Image: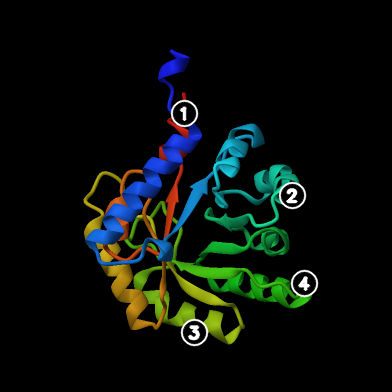
Amino acid sequence: MPSAEISPSERLAAVRAAIAHNAGLARRDPADIELIAISKTHPPEAIAPLIAAGQRSFGENRVQEAQAKWPTLKAETADIHLHLVGQLQSNKADDAVALFDAIHSVDRPSLVTALARAIQAQGRAPDCYIQVNIGEEAQKGGCAIADLPALLHTARDAGLPIVGLMAVPPADTEPAPYFALLAKLARNHGLTQLSMGMSGDYETAVLLGATCVRVGSALFGERG
C-alpha cells in the first residue's frame, strides 16, 4: 500500500540516526563520517528526493552512467559531492577526473599513471583512495595487501592526492575483522580516511573507524 511506503527522507533520517548512534558508542563525532548514497542504476527522479531531503554525497559505479545523469543534477545543486566507487578503466581516467570529486578504486600502477596525467592536464584533483582486496578474493578488484606499500609509494610519487583506503569485505562473513585490518593498514601508512561499510554493515564500519560509508538499498530501497 502506498501509505505504508517509507519516504526517502525517512530512510535518510533512519540511516543518519544509526550512524550517529554508533558514532556515539565509539566516542566519535558523527560529523566526521560522510554518508555516501549509492545511486548507481537509479534515475534522476529517484535521486532528487534525497537531494531535497538534504543529502549531498552520492556514489556511482560507472563513469558513463554518471555522465548521463549527474552534470544536470550537479548544476541544479552546486554542493553535490560525487564519488566513483566502482572499478575504473585507465582509458576512462580523464572523464573520471573531470566529473568526480573522489575516486575510491585506485588499485594498480597503470591507473595511477592515467589519473596523474589527467589531473595534471585538467588542474583538478579528486580525492583518491587506494582500494585494497582485503579478503584476497580473486573475483574482486583492489590491490593485494602485500602490494599496498609499493602502490601507495607509486601513487604518492605521481602526485595523486591519496587520502585513505577503501575495501569491500567478503560477502556472508563477519565484516568486523576486515574493517579492523583496513583501519590498521591505514594507520600504518599515515592515512586518516577509511571508505568502508555498506547497507548491511555500515553500523559496524562506523564502530571501527569508517570515515565514509557507502549506502545504497537502505536509502533507495531494495530493487524489485
Answer above or below: position of 36 versus 178.
above
Structural crowding at the residue carrying mark 3, measured as other residues with C-alpha within 10 Å and reported as few (<14), some (14–19) or many (≥20): few
Q: Amino acid at mark 4?
A: Gln
Label 1, label 4: how far apart the Cα atoms are: 37 Å
Residue ID at (43%, 22%): 5
Residue placed at 50% from the left, 68% from the top? 129
Amino acid type at circle 3 is His
Whether pointer 2 and pointer 3 mark residues with C-beta atoms closer than 8 Å, the reply is no
Graded by Cα atoms within 10 Å as few (under 14), some (14 to 19) or many (20 or more), the crowding at tag 4 reads few
Q: Quadrant of residue 165?
A: bottom left
- Which of labels 4 and 2 is toward the front? 2
Residue 122: give its label: 4
Structural distance between the alpha carbons of marks 3 and 4: 23 Å
Say which amino acid is labelled 1.
Arg
Mark 3 vs mark 4: in front: 4
Instruction: Indicate which disc, 1 or 4, sits on the residue closer to the N terminus.
Output: 4
* Alpha-carbon span between mark 3 and mark 1: 40 Å
Q: Is residue 58 left or right of residue 124?
A: left
SS of the residue under disc 3: helix
Q: Which residue is mark 1?
A: 223
x and y percent of residue 116 in the render?
66, 76
In this view, the mark in front (2 or 1): 2
| Residue with the mark numbered 3 | 153
**Residue 195 location, x and y as percent?**
42, 62
Are dots 4 and 2 in contact, CB under 8 Å? Answer: no
Q: Earlier in the sequence, mark 3 or mark 1?
A: 3
Residue type at numbered disc 2: Pro
Q: Position of residue 29 (x, y in %)?
A: 35, 66
